[in-house]
Image: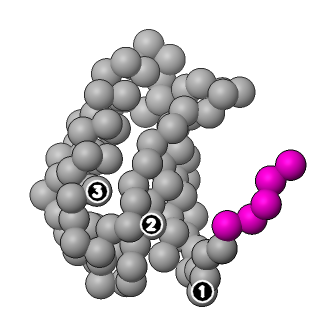
Amino acid sequence: IVIHSEVPIQPDSKEEASDILKEMAIKSRRESGVIDYRVTFDIEDTTVARIIEQYEDWSAVEAHESSSHLEWFQDAIEPLLSNDPQLFQYEVSNKTEAEGP
């Protein structure tokens, strides 16, 4: 399971939001069933954070969604948002490494 979130941050709040996002990533990667949890900022729109979450199964997603650190994150990040976040979820049957240029 892959969940991709686009989180628009107010320009003057990027440093504070970065600290919150980093803490959320660290706590989330410690969860059982989490394959990976990464946060990046878009290089073209530097006020948009992108969260890429990878889970073993839906049970791991549900555990994450009921975690106390997700509730903390939502409360902490909400006043720093410039708009509503967008979330996309994908069910992936396999992952293979592709050759690059």
Q: Which residue is mark 3?
A: 29
Q: The disc labelled 2 sits on which kind of residue? A: Gln
Disc with the residue nearer the chain's start (2 vs 3): 3
Q: The disc labelled 3 sits on which kind of residue? A: Arg
Report how far apart the C-alphas of labels 2 and 3 lie in the structure. Answer: 10 Å
From where the camera sits, is residue 7 visible?
Answer: no
Is 98 included in the stretch rendered in magenta? yes
Q: The disc labelled 1 sits on which kind of residue? A: Ser
**Residue 43 rendering spot, x and y as whole percentages:** 66, 28
Snapshot quadrant of residue 97 = bottom right
In the displayed structure, would residue 93 be above or below residue 3? below
Q: Which residue is mark 1?
A: 93
The magenta stretch is 97-101
In the displayed structure, would residue 28 be above or below residue 84? below
Q: Which residue is mark 2?
A: 54
Q: Main secondary structure of the magenta part?
A: loop
Residue at position x 26%, y 67% from top? 64
